[in-house]
Image (cartoon, rainbow, N blue to C red):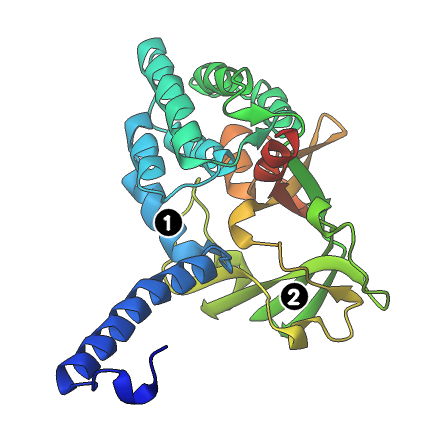
Amino acid sequence: METISDLPEITVTDLRTVNKLIANTARLVMPRKEEKKSERTTELFNSNKYVEIALSCKKLTDITGAVSRDLITSMFTVVEHILFISRVYSPDNEEQETFITTLNQLSSEMKMQKICRHYLDNIISVLKLSDREQSNLVVTLLTKIRDSEMLCSNNENVIIEQHDKTIVRENRESNHLFLFQHPLSRTCTVSDSRCGFVLREILQGDSIRTRMLDFFGGPIQRAFKLTHELCLDEDDYKNTGIHLNDVISARDMHWYHTVTGTCEGKDITVPGRRGWWKYWLPHITDWKYTGFYAAYNLSEYLVAKRK
């Protein structure tokens, strides 16, 4: 058996080699840590990014291009941009078919969030009330999305209505509270609060709420930046009655409003922004925001469960 005295001496070259191995290992490990950390994103919405994408999308191919570059990660957002560009652009049947085929391929490759079928049914039913010339084409395209199992689903999203809202800074910052227990958190043992999450809305710049983005019938205001972020700091959950589970990620969410207007004495409630529906249904003039929701994507959990 060898003793310490029998071992060869460690040279300067050996030490340099060891240090180099340590440095190389660190460089390999750090990106993995950063990659794992980045998987749990916090930014849910950024008005500046959203507007840039909206202005760059003139045709359906522009939308699929944004999806392929991971600028659009949800079919909810795809439908929003379809409603935007369809004001001045009417894709023919061939373009629509190519669009659906491309989206089907990208949906699998990019793991896009599918849109809820009842959400789309609601939009389609309201669009059928529109007298705009291109509304029939939009209804046809959205119906094709609705009929695609790759793009639309009945059970891969959980629709969560806002539970409460608190003001952090008047006209500047507010917290939207949601109650939600992810299936992977069924064994959560926290007893002094309920599972959920907080979305923080931050407005920078122009504080006049009436000058918010209006894609239809009004100028796009660039004097402000609006963001929605998933709160991860424990301090953000104090006195809310809510706690956050580690599995919750902003990338798996899509937030949206519902608006309500009066048509022939009856209330119509539909997802979207007032600007959309002021354009598509100009005879309704009393649109108001009536709900704040988050659609949470559970597709990866469901796939894993089936395995």
Q: How many marks?
A: 2
Residue extending furthest toward the bottom:
5
Say which label, 2 or 1, has the lower sequence index.
1
Q: Residue furthest left?
A: 13
| Residue 85 coordinates in the image, percent (x, y) | 37, 32
What residue would you read off at disc 1?
Answer: 51
Q: Nearer the viewer, residue 244 or 225?
A: 244
Q: Amino acid at mark 1?
A: Val
Where does the image place residue 103, in percent across and percent down from the top left? Answer: 39, 25
Secondary structure found at label 1: helix
For disc 1, the neighbor class at 10 Å (few under 14, some 14 to 19, many from 20) is some
Q: Which of these two is toward me, 105 or 274?
A: 105
Residue at x 63%, y 34% (from the top left corner) = 302
List x then y, in percent, for residue 204: 46, 69
Residue at (63% x, 67% y) in the render: 174
Q: Kindly report the distance in space between the C-alpha atoms of the residues bearing marks 2 and 1.
A: 23 Å
In the picture, residue 170 is in which quadrant? Answer: bottom right
Q: Which residue is mark 2?
A: 175
**Mark 2 or mark 1, whichever is nearer to me:** 2
Which residue is farthest front?
1
Within the image, what quadrant is residue 91 found in?
top left
Query: Is residue 177 at all visible to an observer of this figure?
Result: no
Q: Residue at x 62, y 54 (%)?
A: 247
For residue 211, side relative to residue 154 (left or right): left
**Quarter of the image containing the C terminus?**
top right
Residue 190 placement, left or right of 21: right
Report whether residue 299 is seen.
Answer: yes
Task: Give coordinates of residue 80: x percent, y percent.
Answer: 47, 36
